[in-house]
């Protein structure tokens, strides 16, 4: 059983968004988290939590369109990509 409140989860996910393995993902996910975590439902937060467990190099390839993300992440990746314009391409 997880006793984590939704606010605690949001704070934890924000910290995980800030401290990634590669700088590009730090920038992209920090912006996304700042803009969206406060309004995401618990189900959306759970999905984002799972996404943050993925490898940063895979995440960057998905965000930049180099490879397709798994179907489960399409909606959240579309939102992340929308905010990453100019970060993933020169």
Image: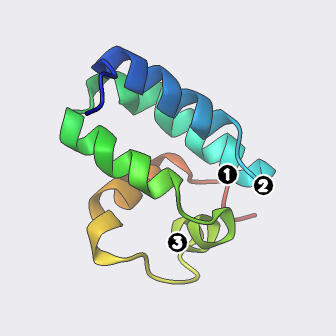
Compared to residue 35, the image places residue 64 above or below, namely: below
Give yes or no for contact between labels 1 and 3 (Cβ–Cβ under 8 Å).
Answer: no
Secondary element type, mark 1? helix
Q: Is residue 39 left or right of residue 36?
A: left
Q: Specify few, some or many for label 3: CA neighbours under 10 Å numbering under 14, 14-19, or 20 or more.
A: many
Give yes or no for contact between labels 1 and 2 (Cβ–Cβ under 8 Å).
Answer: yes
Q: What is the CA distance from the residue labelled 2 to the residue labelled 3? A: 14 Å
Look at mark 2 in the image and give the residue it sits on: 22
Please report the residue visible at 27 percent of the width from the left and 32 percent of the height from the top. Answer: 40
Secondary element type, mark 3? helix
Look at mark 3 in the image and give the residue it sits on: 62
Q: Specify few, some or many for label 2: CA neighbours under 10 Å numbering under 14, 14-19, or 20 or more.
A: few
Q: Earlier in the sequence, mark 2 or mark 3?
A: 2
Look at mark 1 in the image and give the residue it sits on: 25
Q: How is the image coloured?
A: rainbow
Compared to residue 11, the image places residue 19 above or below, namely: below
Front-most of 84 and 77? 77
* Quadrant the C terminus occupies: bottom right
Q: Is residue 85 left or right of residue 74?
A: right
Q: Earlier in the sequence, mark 1 or mark 3?
A: 1
Q: Determine which quarter of the picture holds residue 36.
A: top left
Residue 63, numbered label: none
Number of dots carrying numbers: 3
Front-most of 2 and 76? 2
Q: What is the CA distance from the residue labelled 1 to the residue labelled 2? A: 6 Å
Q: Residue 46 in the image: state x and y as whole percent.
A: 30, 44
Front-most of 4 and 61? 4
Secondary element type, mark 2? loop
* The furthest residue to the front: 1
Please report the residue visible at 34 percent of the width from the left and 22 percent of the height from the top. Answer: 4
Please report the residue visible at 57 percent of the width from the left and 43 percent of the height from the top. Answer: 29
């Amino acid at each position: 059983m997880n006793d984590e409140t939704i606010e605690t989860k949001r704070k934890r996910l924000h910290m995980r968004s800030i401290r990634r393995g590669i700088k590009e993902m730090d920038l992209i996910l920090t912006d996304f988290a700042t803009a969206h975590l406060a309004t995401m439902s618990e189900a959306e937060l759970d999905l984002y939590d799972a996404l943050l467990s993925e490898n940063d190099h895979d995440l960057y390839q998905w965000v930049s369109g180099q490879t397709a993300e798994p179907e489960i992440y399409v909606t959240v990746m579309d939102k992340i990509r929308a905010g990453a314009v100019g970060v993933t391409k020169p």
